[in-house]
Amino acid sequence: MALLTNHRLLITGVLTDDSLAFGIAQRALEEGATVALSGAGRGTSLTRRTARKLGDVGEIIELDVTDEGQIHEAVGEVEARFGRLDGLVHAIGYAPPSCLGSGMFAAPFSDVATAMQISTYSLAALVGAFRPLLQRSEVLGGASVVALDFDGSRAYPMYDWMGVMKAALESLGRYLAREVGEDHVRVNMLAAGPIRTMAAKSIPGFAVFEDTWGERAPLGWDVHDSSAVADTAVALLSPLLRATSGAVIHVDGGAHAMG
C-alpha cells in the first residue's frame, strides 16, 4: 500500500512546476493521496494552469489568507469535497520589496506587518480554520500539518525581515503543535535548503546562497533538485512520522549544522 493511501490533502502555494509545493503535490499523488490545491488572487489562474501538469487534481480552491471570508469559504469547499482533512501543506510566503535586501531599517511597519500576516500568521489562521476537518482525520496517527520553512535560527545576508518571519514561523509551529496535539494533529516545519524557484528569484542576492550552500553542506546541495524536500514532506504527511510534532526538519544537505 502506498504511503498516503486514503489521505485527503490541501496543498497551498503551487504556482509553477518549479515550486516546492508542486513537487510535494506530485509525490503525494504518486503515493496515493487525493489532493486539492489552493491559489490566491491573480495567481489562481497560474495555479490552475500548473495543476493540469499534475493530472488528477480537481477544482482549484481560491484562498487568500488575508481574507477571513475566503478562508471560511475554503473550509466549506474542502468539507463538501472531502468531508475531512488528513494533511495541510502551508507553502505561503510574501514580503514587500522593502523587507528584503535593504537591511533592517528600511521597511516601514506596515510592510513588516504584511509580511507577518502572509508568511507567518497565515499558518495559525489556516490551522485554526481547518481544525474541525483535521480533527476528523481517519488515517493512522491523525492529521499532519507541514509548513515550508527556511532555517530561522541564524541571520542570512539580504534575507532581512523574511528571516525574522521564518524564525517566528518556527516558534508558531511549536505553539500550534502544543495546542492541537490533543486533537491528534501534528505540526512540523520543513526547513529546505535554497531551491531555484520563482519565489527564490524575488530574493535579492539569492545567488549568494546558490554559490555557497553546496560548499557548506557536507552532503552537497543541488539548487535545481527539490526531490528530497518532496520526499521528506510526504514522510511528514504519512503515518511514518506519526509521533513527530513541533519539530524543524532540515533538508539542506546538512548545511544548517556546520560552522
Image (cartoon, grey):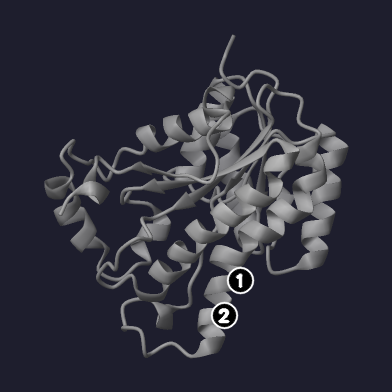
Q: Residue furthest left?
A: 215
For residue 129, above or below residue 184: below
| Residue 120 x, y percent position in the rendering | 56, 64
Q: Can residue 173 be seen in this view?
A: yes
Task: Give the side of residue 85 with respect to residue 83, left or right.
Answer: left
Q: Which residue lies furthest to the top in this view?
A: 1
Q: To which quarter of the image does residue 150 belong?
A: bottom left
Task: Give the residue at x 32% y 51%.
Answer: 196
Task: Give the residue at x 22% y 41%.
Answer: 221
Q: State the SS at label 1.
A: helix
Label 1 neighbour load within 10 Å: few <14, some 14-19, many 20+:
many
Quadrant for the N terminus, please.
Answer: top right
Quadrant for the C terminus, please.
Answer: bottom left
Q: State the SS at label 2.
A: helix
Label 2 neighbour load within 10 Å: few <14, some 14-19, many 20+:
some
Front-most of 14 and 55? Answer: 14
| Residue 140 x, y percent position in the rendering | 67, 21
Task: Give the side of residue 60 with respect to residue 207, left or right.
Answer: right
Q: What residue type is labelled 1?
A: Gln
Q: Is residue 63 visible?
A: no
Q: Mark 1 points at which residue?
A: 117
Q: Name the residue under label 2.
A: 113
